[in-house]
Structure formats: structure tokens, C-alpha cells
Image (cartoon, helix red, strand yellow):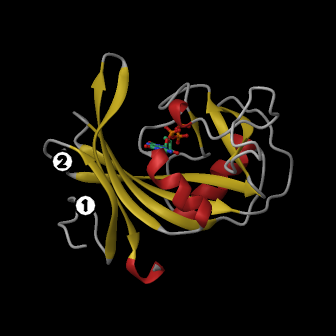
Amino acid sequence: MTSALPPGLEGNLVEYVRGGEGDWLPFDQKRFYTNAFVIQGDKILLGWKKRGFGVNKYNGFGGKVELGETPAEAAMRELKEEAGIVAPLEHAGSLLFMTKGAGWAFQIEIFSARSYSGIPIETDEMRPEWFSFAPPASGVFDTNESVMPIPYEKMWDDDVYWLPLLVQGRKFVGRADFVMEGDEFKMARHWFGTIKSDH
Ligand SMILES: Nc1nc2c([nH]c(=O)n2[C@H]2C[C@H](O)[C@@H](COP(=O)(O)OP(=O)(O)OP(=O)(O)O)O2)c(=O)[nH]1
């Protein structure tokens, strides 16, 4: 399917999902961030963000790319700083994330790994917790399950569109624009694609 890519995205992308309305938000520069997810069997490690941007949401581990670092180096550093573990991270996708009024965009390089060493620990920034991405044998999750399903309702609104691709090992590129509604960020428009050679 051919459709115009949102501003700021490029490459040989095939639309996977889009939604929302209104103009894409304008930006004049990108700032670079990382986010890393560790998978073990049918479980994924998320962290409950205890402070700062995205507080009180579950997310992968990540933050700003510092001067002189590559995104891959920053992703390794942040995973160690925020969860206390080391993992062979591989690039999984890219997300251009905008908030209304900022005037600049977050360029977030997303990484994943299927093994790790060390023991996940709670840090000042994150409380790590395992979640399941496989449906339980019964088809229904009950609250006595020791590992709960991925808590999309407590994550950024766009994650539900690309985290399943990450779990499947399919590379993705997307954009998500957010506006404030009361004291909450709400997604106003989004577009996600997969990379053509991936098909
Ligand atoms: N899953 C997901 N993560 C997002 C979205 N938007 C967004 O900024 N993030 C991530 C990218 C970064 O990992 C994190 C924001 O970085 P941060 O503010 O924690 O950066 P930092 O750790 O360097 O900050 P600090 O320690 O210097 O205070 O949130 C999103 O829509 N979905």
C-alpha cells in the first residue's frame, strides 16, 4: 500500500497501522533517545517509571543519548543504570515521538535482546517487573497468575502498535504525536510501518 510517510520518517516502509487526525505537529530538530526491552521465553521485562518524563507508566529502559555515544552504547548504559543488567541488544525499530508545544521531536531508537546477564534490580528511576506476552492456556488471564499480561493501559498509547512487532522480531518505524488532555498525554495521531525488506 502506498501512502505519504509522515514528516520526519524515511525509508522503504510499508504502512502497518495509522490513526488519529489533525496536522502532524511541527518540529525543527530531533533529540536522540533509546529504549530497551529484554525478552526471556514468553516474558518481557518492563520497568515502572518512578520519576521524570513518563512517570507512573511501564516502559522499556532508556533515556537520552549522551554526547559522543552511539544509540547502541547509550541503550547498553541505560539498561545497566536503570535495571542493573547487561544484554546483547539489537536494533528493533525507531519511533519519532512528538509532544504538542515542544517544537522538537524525540528520535527514539528501540532495542531488544533475548538473553541477559545479572539480576534485574530496582533503581531510583525504575522498578523492573516481568510480563507475559503469550495468552494463558485457559485463554483468560486471572489475577492469581504469577506473571500478568503486558499492561498496555499503563504504557504510552503508541506501544500497543509496535511492541507486538518487537516481540515477533519484525523491524518497525513509526511516528506518534501527543497532546495534553488535563494532566495526561493522549495520542492524537500515529503511523507505523514495517521495513519492506522484512516481508
Ligand atoms: N515506550 C515508549 N517510550 C517512550 C515514548 N516516548 C518516550 O519519550 N519514550 C521513552 C524514551 C526514553 O526511553 C524515555 C524518556 O527518557 P528519560 O526522560 O527517561 O531520559 P533520561 O533517563 O535520560 O532522563 P534523565 O535520567 O536525564 O532524567 O521515554 C513512547 O511513546 N513509548
Residue for point 42% across, 38% down: 157
Please indicate whether residue 55 sits to the left or right of residue 20 in the image.
right
Q: Residues within 10 Å of mark 2 (few under 14, many from 20)?
A: some
Residue contact at pointers 1 and 2, CB within 8 angstroms: yes
Place of residue 75 in the rendered image (x, y in percent of width and height, measured from the top left): 60, 56
Considering the numbered disc 1 on the image, is that residue within a helix, a strand or a loop? loop
Place of residue 68 in the rendered image (x, y in percent of width and height, measured from the top left): 51, 62
Please indicate whether residue 104 sits to the left or right of residue 78 in the image.
left
Query: Rounded to the nearest whole Å, what is the CA distance between mark 1 and mark 2?
Result: 10 Å
Q: Residue furthest top?
A: 182
Q: Residues within 10 Å of mark 1 (few under 14, many from 20)?
A: some
Q: Residue furthest front?
A: 138
Place of residue 130 in the rendered image (x, y in percent of width and height, measured from the top left): 75, 41
Residue for point 51% across, 31% down: 153
Mark 1 belongs to which amino acid? Gly
Q: Nearer the viewer, mark 1 or mark 2?
A: 2
Please indicate whether residue 72 sits to the left or right of residue 98 in the image.
right
Q: Is residue 60 visible?
A: yes
| Residue 124: quarter of image | top right
Q: Quadrant of the N terminus?
A: bottom left
Place of residue 178 in the rendered image (x, y in percent of width and height, measured from the top left): 30, 37
Q: Which mark is residue 171?
A: none
Q: Earlier in the sequence, mark 1 or mark 2?
A: 1
- Front residue (pair 19, 81): 19
Q: Which residue is mark 1?
A: 8
Please indicate whether residue 106 sits to the left or right of residue 57 in the image.
left
| Residue 132: quarter of image | top right
Q: Which mark is residue 24?
A: 2
